[in-house]
Image (cartoon, rainbow, N blue to C red):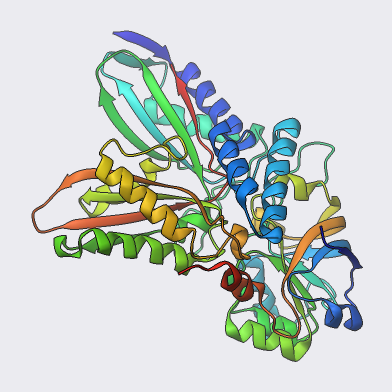
Amino acid sequence: MEEVKRINTPLKEDIVMSLKAGDNVLLSGVIYTGRDAAHKRFIQALEKGETLPFDINGAVIYYVGPAPAKPGQPIGSAGPTTSYRMDAYTPALLDIGLKGMIGKGPRGEKVIESMKKNHAIYFAAIGGAAALIAKSVKEAEVVAYEDLGPEAVRKLVVEDLPLIVAIDAHGNNLYESGPEKYRRG
Amino acid sequence: MREVKFDTLVSTVRDLCMDANYYIPDDVRQKIIEFRDKEESEVARNILDIILKNHEVSANEKMPICQDTGFAVFFIEMGEDVRITGGGFEEAIYEGVRQGYREGYLRKSIVDDPLFERKNTKDNTPPIIHLRLVPGDKIKIVFAPKGGGSENMSEVKMMVPADGEEGVKRFVVDRVRRSGGNPCPPVIVGVGIGGTFEHVAYLAKKALLRPVGSHHPDPRFAKLEDEILEEINKLGIGPMGLGGRTTALAVHIETHPCHIASMPVAVNMQCHAARHKEAII
């Protein structure tokens, strides 16, 4: 087993630049949730000149719509959703300070270009490992768009959230290099 | 005529919704272990171990395996000699879904209209119900919650007879290749061949209910299942698309007679959280 890197939010420039595609990471600190409907509202807010419901500088957004929390627990099962659906909205958020994204599946060329330009990281969480991931979430609070139900924006405090660096700030992409290595014929 | 109470049907459906979402079927888990043990990639082995650990957490804590607790899909075989008393058949299924998703703390993932406002129905209804009338006085219910990520990678193609075996192979393997990490591999690939435009999609979904790695009764199709699986696992996509040998756990083909001019083929992708559960009343 290779070394696991422990990192904290908000993400600092030197940490972001040091992470490499394929690194195993345990992330701790505050992260925000948002998926399709919330991203649409982020962009609408920016277009109207309004501010976002959280400080995006150095922030990490987790693409997740969790299951409801049972009494006494901060959150229900909370695995990643497919990231490419957020691609259209992502470069605008990277341009104003978003430093990290957590999801599953590959990203488009425009997102990767913007990540290189703005020095940002894309982490893969394990899709379907939702109960295990929920155990890393210590606190959860809805901070915006409550009407969206599972898609509302939540502020999460996570401890040792297990992630893999899928695309680093230099544009190295494990979604390409990984399959390349194991392709046959 | 045997009578089954409305409330019995409701509570059976409610329990199915919860249990299917908390407990991974044993055949799925065993297949993941089998592939884990022969996986060459360290990243992939690590991911498969996390998936296996997640099964234990979800079962112990009665938490959903995946937060996407799915569209509620039912395959129901209704005996011709059974009658529901105290309420309607369809209403009982709806009510079971409402109760199961509420009391089980399952995510409600259904929006009312698909194009405009997309407002959440807040109780995960309506379900999709595939109903067959069969001889007898029992009701067999199979519940299979279906996640959106893998469903989005599915496809129907109206091929022609001349496309043949090679055409089918190419279409299925290509569908998996283009899906990459999106459907949460390792996947189970449900393939329908034959029937009509709408029936072939149903066949592909039904194929996902078979025990993982079981074969089509016709040896020609069984061989095709093995060949397609081998091709898929040469793609290198691996668990979550991050590289490895384990891209699919199984390929299941279901077939139906078809029109002289046609050869419909459907691929329904199923993520590694291949949940389904059966009850007989």
Residue at 66% from the left image edge and 60% from the top image edge: B41
Looking at the image, how many numbered discs can be counted on the residues? 0
Quarter of the C terminus of chain B within the rendering = top left
Percent x, y for residue A156? 83, 58
Q: Quadrant of residue B43?
A: bottom right
Find the residue positioned furthest to the left.
B260
State left or right for residue A109 relative to residue A145.
Answer: left
Can residue A52 be seen here? yes
Residue at 33% from the left image edge and 15% from the top image edge: B83
Q: Quadrant of residue B59?
A: top right
State left or right for residue B53 relative to residue A4.
Answer: left
State left or right for residue A142 relative to residue B6.
Answer: right
Percent x, y for residue A99? 80, 78
Can residue B202 be seen here? no
Quarter of the N terminus of chain B within the rendering = top left
Nearest to the observer: residue B233 or residue B101: B233
Compared to A85, does B5 lie above or below? above
Compared to A20, does B81 lie above or below? above
Nearest to the observer: residue B77 or residue B31: B31
